[in-house]
Image (tube, rainbow, N blue to C red):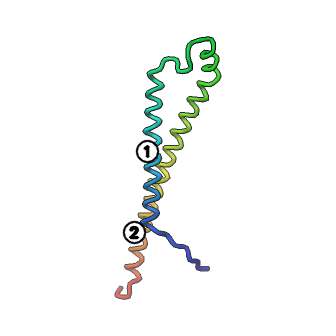
Amino acid sequence: MADDTRIDPDGALRMFGVLVGIGEEIDAALARVINIRSTVVEPWGDDEYGRPFAGQRELNAKDTLEGVGTVADGLIDLGDEGRDAINEFIRLDAENGERLAPDN
């Protein structure tokens, strides 16, 4: 059964490029946060309130930063893979068009 599925290669390439850009921006922001945290010895404070809070929240903060990194990497990978797929689609479409051309 045939359908009317269409792909806008230029639009898809732009969209996947945007995903890569967002992932790179998130990754850069994450690097800045990690750098700032590395310069602060006790970010939650070293008083009677800060130490218990750190004990409760530091692992969550590290897990969150790791999760943000995973999301950034995922966006970059998705964008790269998507662009590769669209470029392959363009290549195959051109190749098939040449094979089906009336003069072949």
Residue 6 x %, y % = 52, 73
Q: Using a 10 Å C-alpha cutoff, classify the residue at mark 2 as few (fewer than 14 neighbours), some (14 to 19) or many (20 or more).
A: few
- Please name the residue shown 59% across and 24% down the image: 58
Q: Secondary structure at mark 2?
A: helix
> Which amino acid lies under the numbered mark 1 shown in the image of this protein?
Glu
Query: How far, Cα to Cα, is label 2 from label 1?
Result: 27 Å
> Which amino acid lies under the numbered mark 2 shown in the image of this protein?
Arg
- Please name the residue shown 53% across and 39% down the image: 68
- The mark found on residue 24 in the picture is 1
Q: Is residue 43 above or below residue 4?
A: above
In the rendered view, does 41 fall on the left or right side of 101?
Answer: right
Residue 101 x %, y % = 38, 84
Q: Earlier in the sequence, mark 2 or mark 1?
A: 1
Please state which of the two labelled residues, at mark 2 or mark 1, is closer to the viewer: 1
In terms of image quadrants, where is residue 28? Answer: top left
- Please name the residue shown 58% across and 32% down the image: 63
The number of discs equals: 2
Q: Name the residue nearer the viewer: 100 or 27.
A: 27
In terms of image quadrants, where is residue 54? Answer: top right
In terms of image quadrants, where is residue 87? Answer: bottom left
The residue identified by callout 2 is 91
Q: Name the residue nearer the viewer: 46 or 83.
A: 46
Q: Secondary structure at mark 1?
A: helix
For the N terminus, the image quarter is bottom right
Q: Using a 10 Å C-alpha cutoff, classify the residue at mark 1 as few (fewer than 14 neighbours), some (14 to 19) or many (20 or more).
A: some
In the rendered view, does 61 fall on the left or right side of 91?
Answer: right
- The mark found on residue 53 in the picture is none
For the C terminus, the image quarter is bottom left
Residue 34 x %, y % = 47, 30
Q: Is residue 87 above or below residue 54?
A: below
